[in-house]
Structures are given as structure tokens and as C-alpha cells.
Amino acid sequence: MTEQRRNFYLTYAFSYSVGALGTTQLIPYLNSNGFDEMQKGVILSGIALVALVSQFLFGVCSDKFKKIKGYYLVTFILCTGVNVFLLMQAIHEFWIAFMLVAWIGGGARCWQGILDTWIFQVEPMKKEYPRCRAIGAVGWALGSWMAALLLSLADFKEVGLLVGGLGGIGIWFSMHCPECKRFSKAPMHFSDLKELVKNRPYLCLVATLLILFAMGCADIYLVVDKILALEGTSFHVGLKWGIQSLAEAPVFLAASKLTQKVKKSSLLLFASAMFGLRFLLYAWISNVWLLVAAALMQMITFPLAMLCSKELIDTLCDEKLKSTAQLAAMSVYMGISLFVMPILCNWLAQKTSIDFALLCVAAMSFAALGLMLLFKRFSPDQ
């Protein structure tokens, strides 16, 4: 194994474990500090603003200045530092919690997007992307389980200490990864952004991902709330995230062969249908352990959507807009869904029930299926 590959592998392993430690227990953290459902919805929706603005900004800057490594380091270090600060103390003030959680959640989405885009800009690491994401999935699973175990034995302070320690190791390895070399030598002008707006297959793909990621956000909020409503604990929440992440690894590892045999648009169409089925199961299940086990469906939903969308965007867009296209897409489908879904999910759950809200989310998959059929019409070869 080359030093370059090793450093990227370990960067994914440690950064994703830190991300899981710091973000998967945010809802139990807010519950323990006395925030009600509506307050939690508003606090969590603040994540959207940071995710939307930061990803688009760093994507444009990356293509403009032909660099990306420094943007990853800045976002990851700030996100980790704020995470440690939050977990080391009990925050009861609404606006302080809003600002800290917004940066932790939005910053995590930002550095994940930058890290994925970084891989695509470093040759020959692009072909290692599925393996890197598989390692990241294992790291996320281990981080989720460590958080659950620590909270069953100690408190959020101990989780904060672990976030700081593992974050420092992740930063060291990422600093030894190479800067990107794949950027187009042609200058990127802000007027070039109109190419993305005119790219119909790209816009159709982003709209599909917006719906699928919105459903993924509902998984974060509604399913966790249902676990807690069924008298589950932080342990069950952490176990769910661990199983969910670990289930991604086999698909990511088999991804290169899978995408060679089946069109990426067809795989994304299949993933859209499975998202709907997944939420039907969530609504039907009334046992906390079965609800945790249902997280295994992550295997046939999120990895396929993430892998196929990354490769499709890389194929559809001009070389000088590679980073902008990837991170602008994430800015839209993450930012909008992260803003809308916490408020919508909490409102639906309060006005009706958690199960009815889950059924409403399941129905969203029909829109994703329609958009993917339209995408296949625009880009039949993909």
C-alpha cells in the first residue's frame, strides 16, 4: 500500500468516527438539556444554513483557486473544536445551542463533501473512492457504538474528550495527504456557473438527490424519535447508527463491479424505490429492536445513491467545474432538506403521529422515481 492511499484511508476512518461520535447523539443531548420538540426542530434546521452556504462557497473557491486540501482542514478542525466545546458542558440557552449545533451538523456535512470531492481530484485515488467510503462507513459505525457505550457508562463529557482525541489523529493523517492535481488549467469564472443551470441532466439529478436526502433526514429525526417513544435509549440510537453505517461497507466495496454491469441511473432508480419501502417498514414496526434492525436497509439505499450520484455528476460536468458541481449539488440537496425536514417532521409528528409522518415520507419516493425516469430520458447512456 502506498503512503498516499494509507493516509487517505486513515483520514476517512478517523474523520468519520469523529463525525459519528459528535453528531449521532445530538437529539439525546438536546433532550437531556430540556429542549422541547419545536425547539429541537428549529435548532436542527440551523444545520441547513451552514451546510448550504459553506459547501457552495468552498466548491466555487476550490475550482477558482485550484486547491481543496486547506478547505477540508479548516472545516474539520472548526467542526471538531465546536463539537468538543458543546459536549463538555450542558447548554440550556436556545440561541447558543442553535449556533453550536448548526456549525457541528452543517460543518460535518461540509467536510464530508469536501473530502469526497478531494478524492475525485487526486489521481489515482478517484478509483479508490468506494473503498474509502467503505472505510468511512466502518469508522462511522465504530464511532456510533463508542458514543452509545460511553453514554451508557458515563456522560457527554467523556464523548467530547474522545472526539477531541480522535479528531487530532484524523487531522494529522489528513495533513499528510497530497493536494489535488486534477484541476483544469483553464481559469474558472463566476459566469461559468450558468453552465450548471443549463445542464438539464445535472438539475434533474440534483432534484432527485434532494428528495432522497430529505428522506434520509427524516430517518435522522423521525426514526430516532420513534426509538425513544418506544422506550429506547441512547444505546439503541447509537446501535441503529452503527448498524446503518456498517451495512454500507459491503456495497461500497462491491461498487466498482456493480456500476460496470448496471447503469448508474438504473441503480439510482432502484435505490429510490427501496427508500420508499424502507419508510413503510419504519411506520409498520412497533418493536424497538426490530426498528434498529431495519436500519440494515441502508445497504440498498444510501450507498447506491451516494456512489452513483458522485460518479454521474463527475461525468456530466465540465472539468473546470468539477468541485463546484459536486459541492453545489450537496449544498442544494443537503441544505434545503436539512432546513425543511426537521421542522416538517416535528410538525407532522405533533399534529398527527410519528407513524403517519413516516408514511408521508415513504410517499416522497414516487417523486424521486419520476425524476429518475426523466433523467434516463435526458441521458439514456448513463
Image (tube, helix red, strand yellow):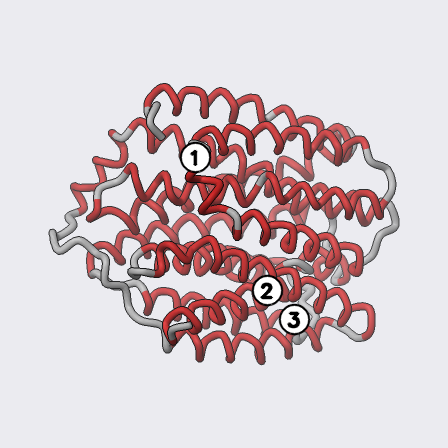
Name the side, left or right, on which 188 lies relative to 289.
left
Taking the image as shown, residue 357 lies to the left or right of residue 263, namely right
- Which numbered tag is attached to residue 347? none
Element under disc 2:
helix
Could you tell me if the residues under marks 3 and 1 are in contact, i.e. CB atoms within 8 Å? no
Residue at the outermost left position: 186
Residue position for label 1: 264
Residue highlighted by disc 3: 87
* Disc with the residue nearer the chain's start (3 vs 1): 3
Could you tell me which residue is drawn at 55 percent across and 63 percent down? 16
**Amino acid on which disc 3 is placed:** Leu
Amino acid type, mark 1: Lys
Q: Is residue 72 left or right of residue 139?
A: left
Q: Tell me which corner region of the image, top left, top right, bottom left or bottom right, holds residue 358.
A: top right
Q: Is residue 231 visible?
A: yes
Q: Residue at x 47, y 36 (%)?
A: 209
Circle 1 SS class: helix
* CA neighbours of label 1 inside 10 A, class few (<14), some (14 to 19), many (20+): many
Q: Which residue is mark 2?
A: 139
x and y, in percent, of residue 59 in the image: 31, 53
Task: Name the side, left or right, on which 182 lies relative to 42.
Answer: left
Q: Earlier in the sequence, mark 2 or mark 3?
A: 3
* Marks 2 and 3, how far apart at CA: 20 Å
Q: Count of labels shown?
A: 3
Query: Residue 306 at x, y = what percent?
Result: 48, 44
User: Closer to the camera, 92 or 116?
Assistant: 116
Q: Nearer the viewer, residue 326 or 341?
A: 326
